[in-house]
Amino acid sequence: MNDFQHNGILSLPLEYFPGIPAPVRTEVLRKSIHMLVALVPFVAALNQGITLALLASGTIIYTYAELLRCRGVRVVLISRLTAMASRERDLGKFVLGPVTLGLGTMLALLLYPAPAASIAIFALAFGDGLASLVGKLFGRIRIPYTGGKTIIGSAACFAAIFFSARSVGASLFTALAVASVSTLVEMLPLKDLDNILLPLSAGTIAAVFGYLAV
């Protein structure tokens, strides 16, 4: 096996990121991929049907490739990238994150009208993504009963969701409501299931309270 490995975690070579701990490097790569879903609303604005088809196809292809990887059959690029972005808790297991990420994004497009769907997807991309990155890099004070979430990570989540909601026309009240509820959901120790529950909570609040600024 020619993948790079550090402390039991398949990752990028140390010389690529000198002085940065392996778990942080892994999280940077993982959440950089995660935040790419922020492009989905822009693609969906051109053709939502094709966008959903691409998301579904990508999720199915990944699932098949990951099943093969778990059986020792490596798929070019997909298996390597999965291994590089895997956390320690994922070692020897099916890495579920990309599947729930795809499902959460598709549900947001299917269940909510365009502005609320965008808010839901941006909450998933930036709220969850920055919460993890900022928490890993700067988090010192952990929040009890949250599975290791930090105060600064949750603050980054709130800010990211608030400003992304405002950027697509949410009123001040709606942006605050979406950011507050979504941050509480992100704080729960849901592991990869937050990729589904976070956009659903953000989209539902945006749709219920209205999303156009007045």
Image (tube, rainbow, N blue to C red):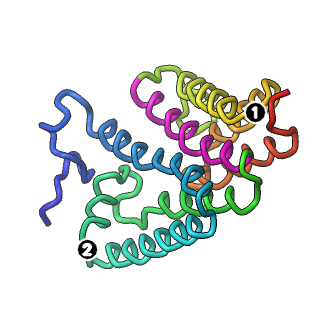
- Relative to 24, residue 141 above or below: above
Quadrant housing the C terminus: top right
User: Which callout, 2 or 1, points at the residue further toward the start of the chain?
Assistant: 2
Q: Read off the residue under disc 1.
A: 170
Task: Tell me the residue at 36%/39% (across/down).
Answer: 28
Whether 132 is among the magenta residues is: yes
Please state the extent of the stretch shown in magenta in the rendering: 116-137
Taking the image as shown, residue 94 lies to the left or right of residue 122, namely: left
What is the three-letter code of the residue carrying label 2?
Arg
What percent of the width, then of the height, locates residue 209? Answer: 87, 38
Whether 52 is among the magenta residues is: no
Marks 2/1: CA–CA distance: 44 Å
What is the three-letter code of the residue carrying label 1?
Ala
| Tag shown at residue 95 | none
- Relative to 155, residue 208 above or below: below
Taking the image as shown, residue 17 lies to the left or right of residue 121, namely: left
- Relative to 139, residue 62 above or below: below
For the residue pair 127 and 122, the one nearer the viewer reads as: 122
For the residue pair 162 and 184, the one nearer the viewer reads as: 162
What percent of the width, then of the height, locates residue 109? Answer: 67, 58
For the residue pair 168 and 63, the one nearer the viewer reads as: 168
Task: Tell me the residue at 43%/22% (across/down).
Answer: 138
Task: Tell me the residue at 36%/53% (across/down).
Answer: 86
Q: Read off the residue under disc 2.
A: 74
The kind of secondary structure element at disc 2 is: loop
Q: Are marks 2 and 1 in contact (CB under 8 Å)?
A: no
- Nearer mark to the viewer, of 2 and 1: 1
